[in-house]
């Protein structure tokens, strides 16, 4: 007899197999009990008929199997056309491994605060199970996409000596009698990697020491940050839209069941795979907002209402290009058509989810970067190495960063971005 997983059941129809499972729910009707089972790879139904097991076992199924009890189940795999999975197991025997009494998360509605406080157990439920599977698939598809496009994965440090953009919103820690900070971005290190390897990407955790007050921000999240030598912003935008479309198509191909579990239809995602995405300038965006009734002037940054309105005009992701330099980072080069602006673009997701990618060209002019470092109070001691990248054989280069949780929140239509991370730290409880 073979030991299998639920996901392997379709390959074993008519065979007697053994599976390690947990009970998610059950009901009984006379001489038959219906058990809802999970094993980490999927969910399906187990059926126990009184005539197929001993009286002791049937009684145990009714009285000893509680929600999240773990047990080995032995039985025959059969087709089940009534279920979405399409298969079930007709149980001949089972052996309890771990009892579960008064499991705190019942089959009823719970508030998000309760669920996050019990995240270690909530992960077992269908929705977070599906979200974690989707998250895992996006990370795998990310590696596949960049590998196909000639990128090298490049790991940036998590502990750094300074901030990428000179901000004070840093988590400070003692590093052997010196100050060190949790990384806010791998970008600057990624630029060094790109000038050595051509095309690189980093993927890892980043941190923001600010008490976020929205459901769309975290203090700890994951970023995917490519950097590309010999590339201008327009070419970078093409990579960005191809990357997003690739991720979405990959989820359509491999996670249709999980998407359905979280309430996202595959059909609703298909338009987002159609390229190119629309592009408008910051100036055009300001005019659109004014026409839409917003009290806004040139120079203002966009918040959630503005981003939502702009994306709603296109019903698909849209690039907003060339923002004013005052609201963007020091390393972005001046727009040759308007020196008030820099060469950059944000990619806004539709359906109210806002910016999912921020990108720009990186200035490769040594004197310009040197002056910007001085202007922003960034010392040569901490940033001299970054200046060196312009001093020794620099080239036009561009890059972007995608927030993994923000992307997942959009794709899975989640109100709370925290639902897309496995274990939000207690600091994130500061978020409402």
Image (cartoon, grey):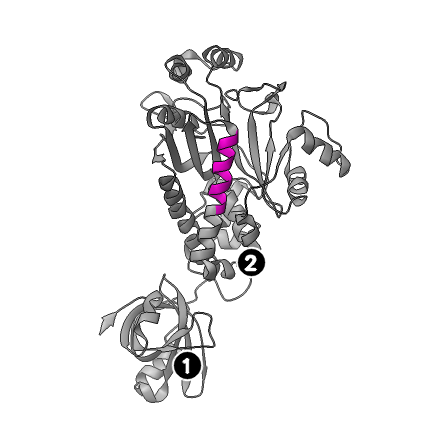
At label 1, counting other C-alpha atoms closer than 10 Å, the crowd grade (few under 14, some 14-19, many 20 or more) is: some
Which of the marked residues, 1 or 2, is nearer the chain's N terminus? 1
Q: Is residue 102 in sight in this rendering?
A: yes
The quarter holding residue 185 reads: top left
SS under mark 2: helix
Q: Residue furthest left?
A: 1
Residue shown at 32% from the left, 82% from the top: 57
Where disc 1 sits, the SS reads strand
In which quadrant is the N terminus drawn?
A: bottom left
Q: Quadrant of residue 129?
A: bottom left
- Please tell me whether residue 266 is drawn above or below residue 223 in the rendered image: below
Place of residue 95 in the rendered image (x, y in percent of width and height, measured from the top left): 28, 74
The reply to whether the C-beta atoms of the residues labelled 1 and 2 are less than 8 Å apart is no
Q: Residues within 10 Å of mark 2 (few under 14, many from 20)?
A: few
> Which residue is more in the foreground, 38 or 170?
38
Residue drawn at the location 52% of the way across and 53% of the way down: 412
Which residue, given by chain and number where applicable, does mark 2 sit on? Answer: 267
Residue 97 appears in the figure: no
Q: Position of residue 83 (x, y in %)?
A: 46, 73
Query: Taking 338 as reference, is 130 left or right?
Result: left
Question: Mostly what secondary structure, the magenta segment?
Answer: helix
Q: Position of residue 16 (x, y in %)?
A: 27, 77
- Above or below 113: residue 38: below
Depth order, front residue of 280/69: 280
Magenta extent:
234-245
| On screen, residue 237 above or below 12 | above
Q: Quadrant of the C terminus?
A: top right
Q: Nearer the viewer, mark 1 or mark 2?
A: 2
Query: Residue 367: horizontal and vertical position, in percent?
Result: 48, 10
Residue annotated with mark 1: 33
Residue 273 included in the magenta stretch of the image: no
Q: Distance of mark 1 from mark 2, alpha carbons?
A: 36 Å
């Amino acid at each position: 007899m073979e030991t299998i997983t639920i996901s392997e059941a379709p390959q074993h129809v008519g065979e007697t197999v053994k599976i390690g499972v947990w009970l998610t729910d059950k009901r009984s009707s006379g001489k038959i009990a219906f058990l809802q089972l999970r094993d980490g790879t999927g969910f399906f139904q187990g059926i126990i008929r009184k005539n197929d097991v001993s009286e002791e076992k049937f009684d145990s199924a009714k009285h000893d199997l509680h929600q999240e009890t773990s047990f080995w189940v032995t039985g025959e795999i059969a087709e089940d056309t009534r279920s979405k999975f399409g298969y079930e197991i007709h149980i001949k025997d089972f052996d309890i491994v771990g009892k579960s009494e008064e499991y705190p998360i019942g089959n009823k509605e719970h508030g998000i605060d309760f669920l996050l406080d019990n995240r270690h157990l909530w992960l077992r439920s269908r929705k977070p199970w599906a979200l974690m599977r989707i998250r895992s698939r996006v990370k795998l598809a990310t590696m596949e996409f960049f590998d196909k496009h000639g990128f090298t994965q490049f790991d940036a440090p998590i502990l750094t000596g300074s901030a990428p953009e000179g901000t004070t919103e840093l988590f400070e820690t003692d590093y052997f009698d010196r100050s060190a900070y949790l990384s806010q971005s791998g970008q600057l290190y990624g630029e060094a990697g790109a000038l050595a390897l051509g095309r690189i990407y980093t993927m890892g955790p980043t941190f923001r020491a600010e008490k976020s007050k929205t459901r769309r921000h975290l203090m700890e999240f994951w970023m995917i940050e490519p950097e590309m030598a010999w590339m201008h912003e327009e070419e970078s935008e093409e990579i960005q839209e191809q990357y997003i479309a690739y991720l979405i198509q990959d989820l359509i191909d491999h996670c249709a069941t999980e998407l359905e579990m979280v309430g996202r239809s595959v059909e609703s995602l298909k338009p987002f795979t159609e390229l190119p995405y629309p592009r408008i300038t910051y100036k055009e965006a300001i005019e659109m907002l004014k026409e839409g009734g917003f009290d806004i002037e040139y120079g203002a940054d966009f918040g959630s209402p503005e981003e939502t309105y702009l994306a709603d005009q296109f019903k698909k992701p849209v690039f907003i290009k060339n923002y004013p330099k005052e609201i963007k980072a020091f390393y972005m080069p001046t727009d040759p058509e308007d020196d008030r602006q820099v060469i950059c673009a944000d990619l806004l997701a539709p359906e109210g989810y806002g910016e999912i990618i921020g990108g720009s060209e990186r200035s490769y002019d040594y004197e310009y970067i040197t002056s910007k470092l001085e202007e922003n109070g960034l010392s040569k001691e901490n940033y001299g190495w970054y200046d060196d990248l312009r001093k020794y054989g620099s080239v036009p280069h561009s890059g972007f960063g995608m927030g993994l949780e923000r992307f997942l929140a959009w794709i899975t239509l989640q109100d709370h971005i925290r639902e897309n991370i496995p274990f939000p730290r207690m600091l994130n409880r500061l978020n409402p």
